[in-house]
Structures are given as C-alpha cells and as structure tokens.
Image (cartoon, rainbow, N blue to C red):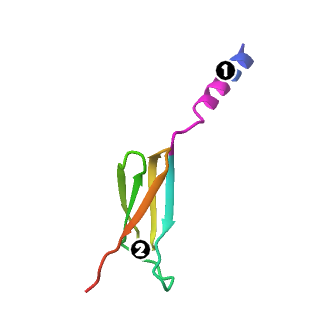
Amino acid sequence: MARTLLCILAGAACVWGQNTTGTILGVVRDSSGAVIAGAKVRIANEATNIAVGVVTNTSGDYVATNLPAARQLSDLGMRTSE
C-alpha cells in the first residue's frame, strides 16, 4: 500500500513540472563595455504588444520573470545625464 501511494505522489509531481512562462535576463552595457545602472528595459509580447518594464540594478543586470511563452521583443530607454 505504501509503495503504491509513493508512486501516485511521484506521478502527480511530474504533472506539475511543465511551465508556460519564462524569464529573460541580461546586462546593459555602453559602447565601451561599462555597465549602465538605472536603464529602462521594455520587453513586449510580439503577438499582443503587452509589455513589461524593468530597470537595471547597479551592476547593469535586469530580470523579467513570469513572461508568457511567446516571441518577446525588447528595447532600451536610456536615461540621460546632464
């Protein structure tokens, strides 16, 4: 009985293993290779044009999570310094 229950629970865990979302991550750098902190990155679903905006951290890194599985386009809105 315990062996059967273990197999059923293990099978149930496998069903939840598939995911329909993804993550995009990256680093924003300028032409000299220096990282850019505070840059605005926009990631848009190509089919729906629904967009997610993220901002780079002090290391120039950004992460956009829970994006639907689809072709995604990104663009960068640079901050300006005066």
Q: Residue 37: image x %, image y %?
A: 39, 75
What residue is pinned by disc 2? 58
Give the residue at x 35% y 48%.
50
Going by the picture, which residue comes out furthest to the left? 82
**Observer-nearest of 28 and 59:** 28
Q: Secondary structure at mark 1?
A: helix
**Rendered-image quadrant of the C terminus:** bottom left
Q: Residues within 10 Å of mark 2 (few under 14, many from 20)?
A: few
Say which mark, if any, is on residue 22: none
What residue is pinned by disc 1? 8
Q: Alpha-carbon distance for marks 1 and 2?
A: 47 Å
Give the residue at x 39% y 68%.
76
Give the residue at x 67% y 27%.
10
Q: Residue 42: image x %, image y %?
A: 37, 60
Span shown in magenta? 8-21
Give the residue at x 49% y 86%.
32
Going by the picture, which residue comes out furthest to the top? 1
Identify the amino acid type marked 1: Ile
**Rendered-image quadrant of the N terminus:** top right
Q: Residue 13: image x %, image y %?
A: 61, 30
**Observer-nearest of 13 and 78:** 78
Question: Is 12 contained in the magenta span?
Answer: yes
Q: Which is nearer the N-term, disc 1 or disc 2?
A: 1
Q: Is residue 29 above or below residue 11?
A: below
Identify the amino acid type marked 2: Thr
Q: Residue 27: image x %, image y %?
A: 49, 70
Do the residues bearing badges 1 and 2 touch, measured as CB atoms within 8 Å?
A: no
Q: Is residue 61 above or below residue 23?
A: below
Q: Is residue 20 left or right of residue 4?
A: left
**Observer-nearest of 43 and 48:** 48
Q: Secondary structure at mark 2?
A: loop
